[in-house]
Image (tube, grey):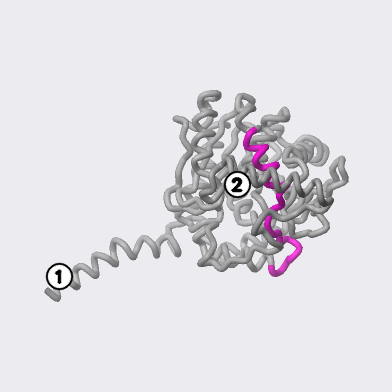
């Protein structure tokens, strides 16, 4: 009896305990966030150019470039809501090690770009298409002037809200993007179980009342200046080292912090979701969608529906009409545990190499 109990415990540890440990501190990962890698990222980032341009409506847009291979296509990184290019230092470093230059934009209203309301913590936008317009200005005007010798083609890697922006940019503007990888794209916002018709009605009614009664944007219900959460509460990533790294970044540079969203931001996000579907036939390039298996931020069902419709219109997008699911991963695939993150990066690089 004692022998059977001991055997069972050993079996449990070997086959259930070990994989969890391997995910957390795997020596097999070629991109593990070790102290040596952190030092290498710091040294690499000193070579990255950080700058800003001013839009036609007088908004300062920050961006970062790692350009040193003019003969090769580069990667355009389009971050998600509330993020800054400073959060993407590790990813830019890993892409550089794969031989890819990169450029990263800070969207208007967040990161190091100009804020759009008197309350700098509000996540706000007047028109969602302004995000795409800023991206177009960076790629087709600013970089063309600054780096005229650089390769005229690029790949695009877009996360969450950045996925919605990237798709809209590709629908609206002539471009030089050879292939796109979407990471947990915000095809539609997550409504937390609220019926679609009710959520949309609340958003539109609130946005309308805001415009009627105040020139100052209102937060949506339950939103506020700072969305604090512990590692245990967060549903963005399972990686404690990366979570702590970002917390340290925001503490060192509090100007990066962003809170919840306004009624108008949500109304524009809903409108953009409609536009993405109505203009889906304008997306003719190869598109890969990576989906987080344990998603809590965006709507996975909307991703699946979009993939199915997109594949019908463009058979080089969403192979077999399906997103590629990374089972068990949270929303931020490129900041996850190494086990999940390696899958996301490897799939991204493989997609770009397939469409050279």
Q: Is residue 50 visible?
A: no
Whether residue 241 is situated above or below residue 172 in the rendered picture? below
Q: Nearer the viewer, residue 141 or 169?
A: 169
Whether residue 259 is situated above or below residue 207 in the rendered picture? below
Disc 2 packing (10 Å; few <14; some 14–19; many ≥20): many
Disc 1 secondary structure class: helix
**Residue drawn where x is 52% and y is 58% of the image:** 235
In front of the other: label 2 or label 1?
A: 2
Quadrant in which the C terminus is drawn: top right
Whether residue 111 is situated above or below residue 229 in the rendered picture? above
Disc 2 secondary structure class: loop
Quadrant in which the N terminus is drawn: bottom left
Q: Main secondary structure of the magenta part?
A: helix
Q: Which residue was labeled with disc 1?
A: 4
Tell which circle, 2 or 1, labels the residue nearer the N-terminal end.
1
> Viewed as shown, does residue 339 lie left or right of 209?
left
Q: Nearer the viewer, residue 329 or 341?
A: 329
Q: Which residue was labeled with disc 2?
A: 160
Specify the quadrant of the image occupied by residue 111: bottom right
Q: Position of residue 95 (x, y in %)?
A: 60, 48
**Residue drawn where x is 75% and y is 36% of the image:** 136
How many angstroms separate mark 2 from mark 1 (CA)? 49 Å
Q: Position of residue 341 (x, y in %)?
A: 50, 52
**Residue drawn where x is 68% and y is 54% of the image:** 220
Q: Can residue 223 be found in the magenta stretch?
A: no
Q: Which residues are magenta?
A: 251-274
**Residue drawn where x is 24% and y is 65% of the image:** 11
Q: Is residue 332 visible?
A: yes
State how many labels appear. 2
Specify the quadrant of the image occupied by residue 130: top right
């Amino acid at each position: 009896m004692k022998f059977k109990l001991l055997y069972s415990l050993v079996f449990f540890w070997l086959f259930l305990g070990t994989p969890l440990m391997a995910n957390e501190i795997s020596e097999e990962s070629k991109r593990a966030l070790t102290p040596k890698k952190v030092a290498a990222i710091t040294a690499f980032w000193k070579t990255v150019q950080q700058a800003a341009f001013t839009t036609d409506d007088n908004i300062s847009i920050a961006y970062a470039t790692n350009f040193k291979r003019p003969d090769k296509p580069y990667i355009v990184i389009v971050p998600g809501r509330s993020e800054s290019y400073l959060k993407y230092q590790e990813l830019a470093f890993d892409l550089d090690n794969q031989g890819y230059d990169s450029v990263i934009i800070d969207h208007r209203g967040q990161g190091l770009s100009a804020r759009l309301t008197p309350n700098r913590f509000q996540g706000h936008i007047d028109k969602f298409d302004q995000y795409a317009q800023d991206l177009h200005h960076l790629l087709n005007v600013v970089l063309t002037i600054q780096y005229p010798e650089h390769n005229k083609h690029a790949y695009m890697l877009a996360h969450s809200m950045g996925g919605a922006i990237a798709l809209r940019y590709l629908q609206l503007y002539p471009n030089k993007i050879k292939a796109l990888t979407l990471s947990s794209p915000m095809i539609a916002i997550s409504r937390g179980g609220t019926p679609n018709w009710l959520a949309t009605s609340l958003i539109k009614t609130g946005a309308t009342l805001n415009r009627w009664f105040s020139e100052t944007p209102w937060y949506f219900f339950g939103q506020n200046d700072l969305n604090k959460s512990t590692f245990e509460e967060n549903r963005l990533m399972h990686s404690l080292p990366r979570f702590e790294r970002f917390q340290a970044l925001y503490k060192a540079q509090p100007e990066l912090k962003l809170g919840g969203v306004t009624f108008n931001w949500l109304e524009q996000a809903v409108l953009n979701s409609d536009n993405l579907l109505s203009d889906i036939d304008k997306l003719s390039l190869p598109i890969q969608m990576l989906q987080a298996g344990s998603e809590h931020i965006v709507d996975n069902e909307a991703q699946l529906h979009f993939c199915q419709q997109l594949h019908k219109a463009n058979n080089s997008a969403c192979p077999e009409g399906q997103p590629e699911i990374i089972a068990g991963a949270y929303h931020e695939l490129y900041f996850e545990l190494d086990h999940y993150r390696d899958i996301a990066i490897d799939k991204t690089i493989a997609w770009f190499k397939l469409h050279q």
